[in-house]
Amino acid sequence: MAQAEDVEPETYKIMRTIENSLMDNDNVDLEQYLLFWEHVCKVMGSWGTVFGFVVKDVTAKIEKLAAMRVADPESYRSIQTMARKESTDGTIRNLKPNRSGTGHLMVLNRALEFVIDMLDGVFTSDDASLKVSTPARCSYDKHLSQFHSWPIRTAVSAALYTLPRKTEFLIRLRGSMPESEDGQFHDVFNRDGRDIVRRVNQLVENFDLVNHNSSA
């Protein structure tokens, strides 16, 4: 019987798609960025119930942006072509239930900041027994809590206590990736993730959306 082919770890797919998301001139490739988020969501699903709300929200934004790409692939090829298209047709400030693609991108950017800072707190800690709830709580309060209702914030606070310690968390994160590649994964995710956040923030500034509440 032929052996089944080795399944590529999701962490490898995350590194590849986040690197492929970066384009020239501070642009971001939307197809690769959405693929990146799909792989991140698969991994987050193993971290604990506290991440369920993030995965659900991110998945909804991915699906809506993917549908926009199918309907108009040229305009939704990158974050810059998307913003220019929506600025021209006057939809860039649209809110729910017809939120613009740029609005969805802004929500995803906050979620990305949350994951980046949480993982950075885990990887940079020298304490193998670190409770992951500590960096997760800090990152949640910094990036997401102000956009959530009181019931959601309360549910998140309770769920944080179910998160494992650093050693177990990293086992779930790696999947079949060798432990020796933890450093590379952290470096790529932290470096390219923060670069994407910077590029999106620059786009938000360029299109005068700094004070636009895309979550409304």
Image (cartoon, rainbow, N blue to C red):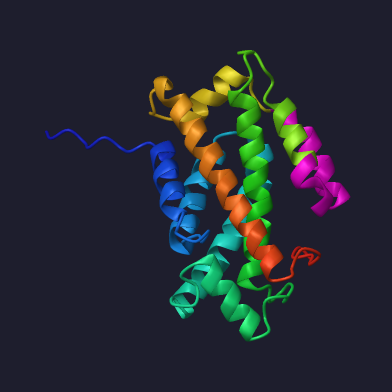
Q: Quadrant of the C terminus?
A: bottom right
Given the current orientation, which residue lies at the most extreme front position?
25
Q: Does residue 45 appear anywhere in the picture?
A: no
The relative height of residue 21 versus residue 189 in the rendered view (above or below) is below
Residue 60 higher or lower than 54, as above or below: below
Residue appearing at x 56%, y 48% in the figure: 195
Q: Residue 208, relative to residue 7: is it above or below?
A: below
Q: Is residue 111 left or right of residue 36?
A: right
6 sits to left or right of 200: left
Q: Residue furthest right?
A: 150
Q: Is residue 199 left or right of residue 39?
A: right
Q: Residue at x 66, y 36 (%)?
A: 117
Question: Quadrant location of residue 165?
Answer: top right
Residue 52 in picture, x, y percent from top left: 64, 45
Taking depth in this image into account, of 190 and 111 the one nearest to the observer is: 190
The number of numbered discs placed on residues in the rendered structure image is 0
Magenta stretch holds residue 154: yes
Choose between 46 and 128: the one closer to the eye: 128
Give the magenta range. Answer: 142-162
Q: Quadrant of residue 114?
A: top right
Query: Could you tell me which residue is drawn at 66 percent across and 28 percent down?
Result: 121
Q: Is residue 170 magenta?
A: no
Coordinates of residue 104 in the picture (x, y in percent) = 64, 64
Residue 190 spot, x, y in % from top left: 56, 37
Q: Where is residue 147 drawn, in percent x and y?
A: 80, 54
Q: Residue at x 38, y 23 (%)?
A: 178
